[in-house]
Amino acid sequence: MIILGIDPGTATTGVGIIKEGKKGQKPTLVKYEKVVTAAGDEMCGRLMKLHHDLTRLIGDVKPDIMCVERLFFNTNAKTAMTVGQARGVIMLVAAENKLPFYEYTALQSKLVLTGYGRADKKEMRLAVQNFLEISEEIKSDDCADALAIAICHWSKVHQVSAKAARRQKH
């Protein structure tokens, strides 16, 4: 199973792709990248670029599942609206490609990777690198967050499978 994780945004959208290993093994890194749009461009053009780049990426990688960070905003309505527009485009791309769509909060991914919900950006980047056993530094918080969302999904699926296996034994 190939899992596409996305950290949505209109200026920068982080994309992280992992591939499930053999039974009992952790997933491995496929790739990560950013979709970056120019601040001076009109929103319609920025959203079209996001749609185009994600559609191309899905065609190249052929993921089985798309996972997106569910956002929580408590103060900045303008940011919430623009990120909401990007999320709409991302959901459209998932629907067009018939990809199952899952959402996880940053808190959920932090709990999976660090065991606590207050991990900062640097801790999360390091936790993702360590989990995927990669030596290269992930310099982009957006990409690390996208990979964390993909790992969070893998973990949730893996936990469900482990619970089901334990129930069958009893």
Image: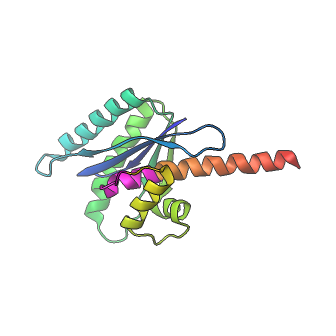
Q: Residue furthest front?
A: 135
Tell me where residue 156 appears, x and y as whole percent. Answer: 60, 51
* Residue under the image location 42 percent in, 61 percent down: 126
Q: Please tell me whether residue 33 is drawn above or below residue 123 in the rendered image.
A: above
Q: Is residue 70 left or right of residue 13?
A: right
Q: Please tell me whether residue 128 is drawn above or below residue 16 in the rendered image.
A: below
Q: Residue furthest right?
A: 170
Is residue 103 visible in this depiction of the protein? no
The answer to if 138 sits in the magenta stretch is yes
Q: Is residue 51 left or right of residue 165?
A: left
* Residue under the image location 31 percent in, 54 percent down: 83
In front of the other: 83 or 163: 163
Q: Which stretch is magenta?
A: 136-148
Q: Residue furthest top?
A: 59
Main SS of residues in magenta = helix
Name the quadrant of the N terminus: top right
* Residue under the image location 62 percent in, 37 percent down: 22
In front of the other: 135 or 35: 135
Tell me where residue 8 appears, x and y as whole percent. Answer: 35, 51
Q: Quadrant of residue 90?
A: top left
* Residue under the image location 32 percent in, 71 percent down: 75
Tell me where residue 18 appears, x and y as whole percent. Answer: 47, 42
Q: Quadrant of residue 73?
A: bottom left
Q: Please tell me whether residue 36 is drawn above or below residue 60 in the rendered image.
A: below
Tell me where residue 104 appears, x and y as whole percent. Answer: 50, 55
The answer to if 4 sits in the magenta stretch is no
